[in-house]
Image (cartoon, rainbow, N blue to C red):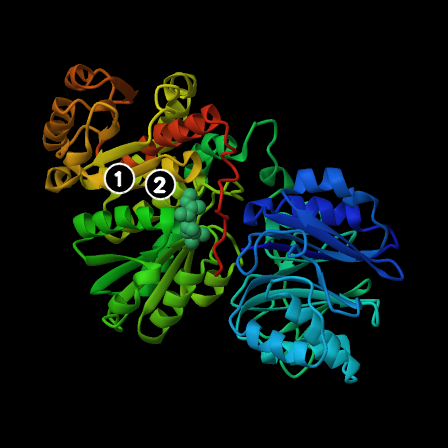
Amino acid sequence: MCGIVGCILKEKNDVAPILFDCISKLEYRGYDSVGIATYDNKINVRKAKGDIESVNEKLRFKNMKGIFGIAHTRWASTGKPTDENAHPHLDATKSVAIVHNGTLENYTELKNELINEGCKFTSTTDSEVIANLIKKYMSNGLNLEDALRKTTEQLKGSYAIVAFSKDEPDKIVATRQDSPLIVAYGKTGYFVASDTPAVLEYARDVIRPREGEIAILSNEGIDIHDKNGKSIKWKSTYIDWTPEMARKEGFDHYMIKEITEQSDAVKNTLTQKGKIQKVIEKIGKVKRICLVACGTSYHASITGKYLIESLAGIACDVVIASEAKYTAKTWDEDTLVIFISQSGETYDSRMALKEARKTSKTLAIVNVAGSAMCEEAEFVIQTQAGPEIGVAATKTYVAQLTAIYLFAGLISKNNALVDELYNVPAYIDEAVKQKDYIKELSKRYDFADDAFYLGRGFSYPVALEGALKLKEITYIHAEGYAAGELKHGPLALIDEKVPVIVIIPPGEDYPKTMTNLEEVKARGAIVLSVGAKGDENITKNSNVFIEMNPKIREIIAPLVYIVPLQLLSYYVTLDKGFDPDRPRNLAKVITV
Ligand code: AGP
């Protein structure tokens, strides 16, 4: 889940400021350490443990000389976050520099072989073997490209590698296996990166090399070679995300900017209605649907299950991608397997997608254009949230929900529901306007060690997502429960120190949820309810009441009721002095 970048400029200018700018855009992929290597008649490397800003203050990356180079921001997997383990890594003779994203399963074996051959290592990473293998094969007479190819033949695991050598100082080479990598070109030069937000400022024509292909960047252009070294014809895709979309634009954090952008995410995703209708027609008849995803996308999938089953009457399972192997055995040609993913790169989802392709029709609902899952699924629906930089998913979640509501509404020919979706952006804007109130009340919650989120029916996945938002950025233990499940165990944990957040929109499930609310209230819990404005029953039974537009029906509520819960997590995080955009131990894209 590290961020990697390489750049070679058309003119002979110093590349370090551009590399620094690009790698700064990828900090959401990891922030354990950072480093840059450039070529200036020799290889220069500056790298250290820490986040990009603090390391830059110490090492002054932008002063580095050289017209091409590579950069890396690390999310540690093999080897602790230390200066030595920071990338780029050099081989023992200091003639090859590499950056790597992924994990190598057989690195110990390879490292021992290299050590037996006299090679000295300076880090405890798996990645350093790559630089040494490339050097070994170059010393045996191969050129850089062939040495990289020969190296990858030895590697087991996932990788995106970008490398250069002082012995062939006019090019950067890159390749991938089960890890994302894009190549891009713009006015100033040629780029390679783990994902597009890194290069948006400089290049928006993007190529995605396939697994095993090698991209060769020189100051004259881009060449992509297949496994046999033969040049292949590539086609680029123009990315319509603007550089501004990936900037903070005056907001304190990406997370609050992205929460504020949610009405646009819904509006823009609604424009996909025609395309979704066409996808449904192409898919044709299905007897069964299975939704597969991780994290927040999994919560959107649960909502999808409830919608598809209740509106279309099609049997629908929902399964966490890393747990899909048993359900996968039941997929057949009458099953449509739907994958929901912001990044389109999540390892577990991709592995399940590979399985599903063998037996079933597959549909990916993805936010990042040109990502792996867009290529790997038979059908694709693109959510239109724009780039999401905050690690905590917010606007991409409501965009995923919008796509799945459209899908369910269209497949069941429920025009009334589809029409109702066009009211959602205004409801979201109204909810965001409550941010000062929520900021104020957040102070009452930063003391908490635990919190419970309750919801029933369509509000159950909202409870799960609300709890995930709280735990991932505030580090408060939080659990989402189906409200009716509480009395089967968790109620024992409720006392006067525990905040319980109840999602209780008006509708069929309201009376039962109200009973559950009263149950927790009776046991002294501090109740925060999210429900319809003016509801006296809720007012009476809650310590705090976040009032939503009463026109929002239960079935539509997931698209809107999540907003105050996101805001609550955001402000509690600020109260506790944490960075909401960079939660500890997490990264935005999970490719391992
Ligand atoms: C949630 O805030 C997280 N970012 C995480 O749970 C995320 O939803 C999960 O890793 C799945 O990612 P994807 O949507 O890119 O597949």
Residue found at x 60% / y 57%: 194
Residue found at x 44% / y 48%: 383
**The label number, if any, that marks residue 501 in the structure image:** none
Judging depth in this view, the residue of 363 and 471 nearest the camera is 471
Q: Is 89 drawn above or below residue 410 in the view shown?
A: below
Judging depth in this view, the residue of 275 and 257 nearest the camera is 257
Callout 2 secondary element: helix
Is residue 149 in view?
no
Image-based side of 344 in relation to 81, left or right: left
Note whether ligand 1 is within 8 Å of mark 2.
yes
Where's residue 121, x and y in %? 69, 67
Judging depth in this view, the residue of 388 and 423 nearest the camera is 388
Residue at the spot of label 2: 468
Cα separation between marks 2 and 1: 8 Å
- The first of marks 2 and 1 along the sequence is 2
Residue at the spot of label 1: 480
Q: Is 529 drawn above or below residue 285 in the view shown?
A: above
